[in-house]
Image (cartoon, helix red, strand yellow):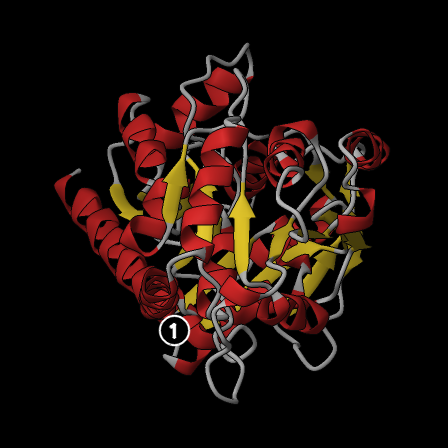
Amino acid sequence: MRVARVSHSAVVAAWRERERELAARGVDVELVSATRWVEGGAPVDLDASGEPNVHGAGTLGHHPNLFAFDPRPLWRLLRDSRVDLVDIHEEPFSVAVAEVLVLKALARNRAPFVVYSAQNLDKHYPVPFRWIERWTLRHAAGAYVCNDEAGRRLRRRGLAGELAVIALGVDLARFHPAVDAAPPHPADRAVRVGYVGRLDWHKGVHTAIAALAPLDGWVLEVVGDGAERANLLDLAARLDMASRLVVHGHADQDALAAHYRSFDVLVVPSIPTPSWTEQFGRVAVEAMASGVPTVVSDAGALPEVVGDAGIVVPAGDAQALRDALVALAADPRRWAALRAAGIERAASYSWRSVAAEHLALYERAIRSAQADRRRR
């Protein structure tokens, strides 16, 4: 099977493990990625040395749904008559999807295509975006989503093809518990609470600060950066927590893995807004894989991602978050049970599992497209 795949987020080398696992299963994947993109609040440059099947494309625009690729790498990709399937890892209403489909038609590429969606809010887009989405979903041989609500939304919007819920993958070779003995429960020392992600208001770090402020000795370690950094430092100072808030800034994948293993618990205190809610929450899976109990808010897909292996509290409720953390720190047996359950659950998010599910979707989509052609 030969697959032409387009994904701006494949600029992150660790997230190309899907393609590597597909190749291990005999799938020939040619990938076009952005040459430079902002991920996690920091710009990332494409490094595809040693990966001849990965091709960079410049981008015009920075919004994930409003940008366009340099069409030349896409044209070369879509002109390949050997392609069995085109995988567009972009939202079906996006400018990038429209661009790929126009070029696909001009190149007379008749291979079926699948698209991706994480959108779990039922937004109503203006023209021409709703037209792009409608046409895309009516003609797609399939789609894959990273949360259940996104799949239901695509069906409501007209997706007739195959549908698969496929998690975002995690590198279990990098994110794993410490190799030595299990860390001691933190009941008799200062608790290290971790947060990983952007410092934006809707990510809820201010809720975590308010939750930890009355807890003497408890430390909040933040890995990430963003527009709210100064406001969060001011809030910590007002709540007499400045000395217990450590902001590390951005970290690469290896440093991030070490940070996880230093935490006693991870919090993901996201707050839904009218235009956004959590679509997956990869940091929760990375923490679980690293042997770190996880406490998340009930925003979007977070409860779905952690399942019974994490604690869920109401979004924006500092008291509920504080109570959950205090109870966990006081209960060694529950802390150990959540740690074990998280490690087990994270195994289902491995890139190997993700690649197997992608391959199954590709095969179904190709069969479905072939059957449609025979009926015409």
| Number of marks in the rendered image | 1
User: Position of 237 compared to 198: left or right?
Assistant: right
Q: For the C terminus, which image quadrant?
A: top left
Task: State the residue at coordinates (27%, 28%).
Answer: 155
Residue 366 visible in the picture: yes
Judge by depth and name the residue closer to the eye, 78 or 32.
32
Residue 197 point in image, percent of width and height: 65, 47
Q: Quadrant of residue 211?
A: top right
Q: In the orientation shown, which residue stands out farthest toward the left?
A: 375
In this rendering, position of residue 90 left or right of residue 203? left
Res 112 visible:
no
Residue in front for this viewpoint, 205 or 123: 205
Residue 21, relative to residue 94: is it above or below? below
Residue 96: % across, % down: 61, 37
374 with respect to 307 (left or right): left
Residue shown at the point (63%, 57%) measured from the top left: 32
Quadrant, the N terminus: bottom left
Up-down relation of residue 156 to residue 222 (above or below): above
Near mark 1 (Cα within 10 A), the count class, few <14, some 14-19 or many ≥20, is many
Q: Where is residue 221 in the image (x, y as percent from the top left)?
A: 70, 54
The answer to whether 177 appears left or right of 346 in the picture is right
| Residue at screen point 37% across, 47% down | 311
Outermost residue toward the bottom in this view:
180
Q: Position of residue 357 (x, y in %)?
A: 30, 62
Which residue does the numbered mark 1 point to in the structure image?
A: 352
Element assignment for label 1 = helix
Identify which residue is drawn at 51% across, 71% down: 171
**Amino acid type of the residue tagged 1 in the rendering:** Arg
Between residue 36 and residue 308, name the one nearer to us: 308
